[in-house]
């Protein structure tokens, strides 16, 4: 299993992602600078969190035009797996690889707290480590995590099962207007989606921060276990 983690100016979660893959899968990912114009042979590309280009213009907008993104789009067209977390999710939407946009949090404040996510389907590379309906604790750290899309796109992604993670209460209850369970105000409490092929996933919270008891939880481990299971079949 070969994983590549892309680093842009301002990325700051690449080391966390490396540690998570090493701890859970035993694989040390390759770190790739955004100025590269080719990708090594990879099974998955990961766009980690941070503040690419200082979040100037719009979060992820400048990174979406970095040289490496042309290769990532080709990688996607060839059926490669891509995971974008937090700023990585923002970059995927700005690059047109996932629908929708990440708007400022409804509170207009930076959000740094634990949250709970419910698994909406478990037949993807990113969710097969859980059971459908499972709830896990993870961490948030973002100022622009309020997922939004137009009504037609929302109807499509909901009807086609592209929502894979939703913000929920610890008991798995979904209430989009509840600021405790849906802390950033995302439409339909959407925390993570996949594309039509199921091979590209974007999510705002940080499961890589929950893979060791010293981090306070191991709830994020199933994400990486599921990825390993899928890519090593």
Image (cartoon, helix red, strand yellow):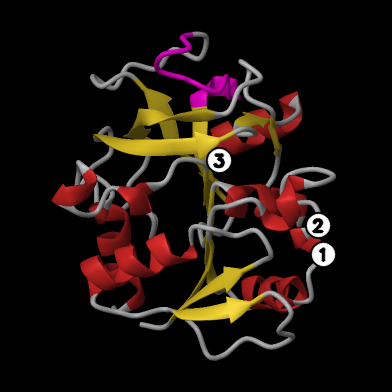
Callout 2 secondary element = loop
The residue where tag 3 is placed is: 160
Image point (34%, 49%), residue name: 209
Q: Are marks 1 and 3 in contact (CB under 8 Å)?
A: no
Q: Residue at x 51, y 78 (%)?
A: 31
Magenta span contains residue 179? yes
Residue 194 in picture, x, y percent from top left: 54, 50
Residue with the mark numbered 2: 62
Quadrant (top left/top right/bottom left/bottom right) for the N terminus: bottom left
The image position of residue 66, as x and y in percent, is 78, 69
Magenta residues?
178-189
- From the viewer's perspective, tell me whether residue 105 is left or right of residue 111: right
Crowdedness of circle 1 by 10 Å Cα count: few (<14), some, many (20+)?
A: some
Residue 65, numbered circle:
1
Q: Which of the two labelled residues, at mark 3 and mark 2, occupies the earlier sequence position?
A: 2
Q: Would you say 112 lies left or right of 195 here?
A: left
Mark 2, Cα crowd under 10 Å, few <14 / some 14-19 / many 20+, is: some
């Amino acid at each position: 299993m070969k994983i590549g983690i892309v680093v842009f100016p301002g990325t700051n979660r690449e080391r966390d992602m490396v540690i998570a893959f090493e701890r859970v899968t035993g694989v040390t990912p390759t770190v790739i600078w955004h100025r590269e114009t080719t990708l090594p042979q990879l099974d998955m590309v990961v766009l980690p969190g941070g503040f690419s280009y200082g979040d100037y213009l719009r979060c992820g907008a400048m990174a979406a035009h970095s040289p490496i993104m042309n290769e990532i789009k080709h990688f996607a067209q060839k059926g490669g797996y891509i995971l974008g977390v937090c700023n990585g999710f923002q970059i995927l939407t700005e690059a047109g690889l996932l629908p929708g946009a990440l708007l400022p949090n409804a509170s207009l404040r930076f959000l740094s707290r634990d949250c709970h996510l419910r698994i909406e389907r478990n037949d993807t590379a990113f969710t097969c480590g859980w059971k459908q309906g499972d709830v896990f604790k993870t961490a948030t750290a973002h100022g622009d995590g309020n997922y939004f899309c137009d009504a037609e796109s929302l109807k499509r992604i909901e009807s086609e099962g592209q929502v894979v993670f939703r913000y929920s209460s610890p008991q798995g209850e979904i209430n989009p207007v509840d600021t405790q369970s849906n802390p950033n105000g995302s439409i339909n409490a959407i925390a993570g989606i996949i594309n039509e092929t199921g091979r590209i996933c974007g999510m705002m919270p940080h499961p890589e921060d929950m893979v060791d008891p010293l981090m306070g939880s191991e709830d994020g481990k199933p994400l990486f276990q599921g990825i390993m299971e899928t890519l090593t079949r």
